[in-house]
Image: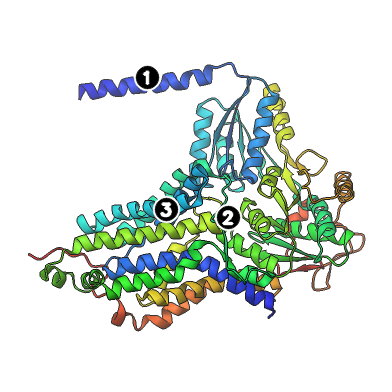
Amino acid sequence: MKRLMALLTVCAALALFAMGPAAAEDAPLTVGAIYVGSVNDYGYNRAMKDGLEEMKKSIPGLKLIEAENVPETAESERIMEGMIQQGAKLIFATSFGHQQFAFNLAKTHPDVVFEHAGGWMQAPNFGNFFGATQSAWYPMGVAAGKMTKSNTLGFVVGVPIGYAIGNVNAFEMGARSVNPNAVTRVVVTGGWSDKAKEAVAANALIDQGADVVTMHVDSPATIIQTAEGRGVYSIGFQSTEARTLAPKGWLTGLGFTWGQFMTATAKSVIAGTFKPAMVRLGLGQGMMAVAPFGPAVSPDVQALVTASAEKIGAGFNPFTGPVTDNNGVVRIKDGESWGGDKMGNFDWYVEGVIGKAK
Amino acid sequence: MNTALVVGVVASSILSGTSLLYATLGELVGERAGIVNLGLEGILLIGAATGFALSALTGNPYVGLIAAAFAGAAVNLIFAYLVVERRANQLATGLCLMFFGSGMSALIGRPFVGALIGGLPRLHLPGLAANGIGMRISSYDILVYLGVPTAGLIWWLLFRTRWGLVLRAVGENPASAFAAGYRPASLQYQALALAGFMGGIAGAHISIAVTQTWAEGMTGGRGFIAIALVIFARWNPFLAIAGALLFGGAEALQLQLQAAGADVSPFLMNMVPYLLTLLVLVVWGWNRQAVAPAALGRTFFGVE
């Protein structure tokens, strides 16, 4: 028993020793980050990881503690608590479902700043951020509308929430802006990450004539590889790195670029000037970027896509009336327009989309 | 209805039904020996992760496939030890195996998320692959072509060999088999090793051939569907082919109908395959006693 006690004491001492220097180190800032999946997913988590790496590079000496596959449960609260124990003064909770748990910790740790991706909660030490994805899909539609030969585009949607429907709508409107005959067929798989079903869904779209396939799911890998295997074009979403999956059929893609915002936030925490805000930025504002083009895209199509991306960046809003849904009902009246606050409200598809929203 | 839709449904149901077929055949062999394995989903996940990992490491998907099969067999032998040797409750142990497989596969697959693999090569049937439709219904990986022969082989093993006769005797009445001089435990080990082997192949087909990716929990409940399909198939390997095609077909059909622009809610569409499975179980359920192995799920405590 005595020996066991001695052993435990040594262990505790070692643990303290191991933890001690982390807190005492004179890094300008220790940043904690939690991901809901793996950072190698060519998708959402990879984009977050790339942003944090850029922040780390921009601020010499900054220390980054990361945890992958953090579930959207109370477990995430314990993991973030552990990061605070290790000296983290800024925490990025990068998945929607981490919000409440990060917010709980923000209340009990007023000296730690939290940034949450995609939510709405606010506190003096709790801000949130996300990309304005919907309008950014417009130039993707331009690329697809120009490249399609069958005038049929395919869109795999995980779960048809308002934001995802908005993405589809802007995509189709972009396609129609350069090709009045373009239609977008939508298939819903019912989950953000049901890989086998995504493969069948992409195949179904291609069977129905789609020659450009895109998606809003967690990781675009399966759908892009399925499209490549069947010899049709693909457009990626989430991370711009997905292009390596389709050397032939890749057209372009929409990726999140969080680096600039994360760096600015870390600097404001170091300077003690952090102010919470609900940040939503899109193309041309630093949070979203058009991925490099694939070999099939001719220079004039590239110029068209780039021009439309610049137009969106300069403030053009595709959701400006009159906008008609695919049953012929006018949803946004002439002179009206839907801003960022209404992007979650879509429960209808625009004219030219073949699919049902609910 | 258009041709593309019919061809698409046929092609996709064959592709996505294949993993279900192997999983169902495996479970069927185990149940014929009297053991229900609710942990099949875990075996599928282990197979998917191991197969993907080894394909990524060696660059050879066939190596991944074989590794997946043996990993499935090895993990199922742990289950066999618990329910046969330690006489643990089969249902509870099966559920534990499911969670174990889910965690273990996450661990195995973790370093390989996002890895690029070539995938099982598609073998084109000569003569058919010339045009679009022919290409779609005649270019599959080896596991698809081996599906029906495997069902035949399992049937032959179960119903035309002495080994199969004794195995079924163990599933019907282990005490009699024991009295006749056979060792029920030994046969149950063999049956579960074969079941795990098939489950590993089923999982690998999803990760290596169909999706060419690994993601946690990617089998999406297909292990549980396969358990239902064993009942549908009345413990008959040939009917298992129909069951696998039926479920794979229902899933392919609802996705094709969405793509074709059917005027039905996508939420309802996504329920169709599961509704169909429920319906089939309801219709088939009344006849279950007559065909299920009599000692299914019971623990054999030996003869005093």
Look at label 2 and name its amino acid.
Ser
For disc 2, the chain is A
Q: Earlier in the sequence, mark 2 or mark 1?
A: 1
Identity of the residue furthest to the front in this view: B126
Q: Mark 2 = which residue?
A: A193
Report x, y in % for residue B39.
37, 59
Residue at the (65%, 62%) spot, across then down: A202
Q: Mark 3 lies on which chain?
A: B
Amino acid tagged 1: Ala
What's the residue type where badge 3 is placed? Answer: Ile
Above or below, A224 relative to A347:
above
Q: Do the residues at pointers 1 and 3 share their chain? A: no
Q: Is residue B240 visible?
A: yes
Task: Kindly state the secondary structure of the residue where label 2 is placed.
Answer: loop
Between A196 and A137, the one nearer to me in the picture:
A196
Q: Are marks 2 and 3 on the same chain?
A: no
Q: In this view, does B76 lie to the left or right of B172?
A: right
The vertical placement of A144 against B159, above or below, is: above
Q: Which mark is residue A13?
A: 1
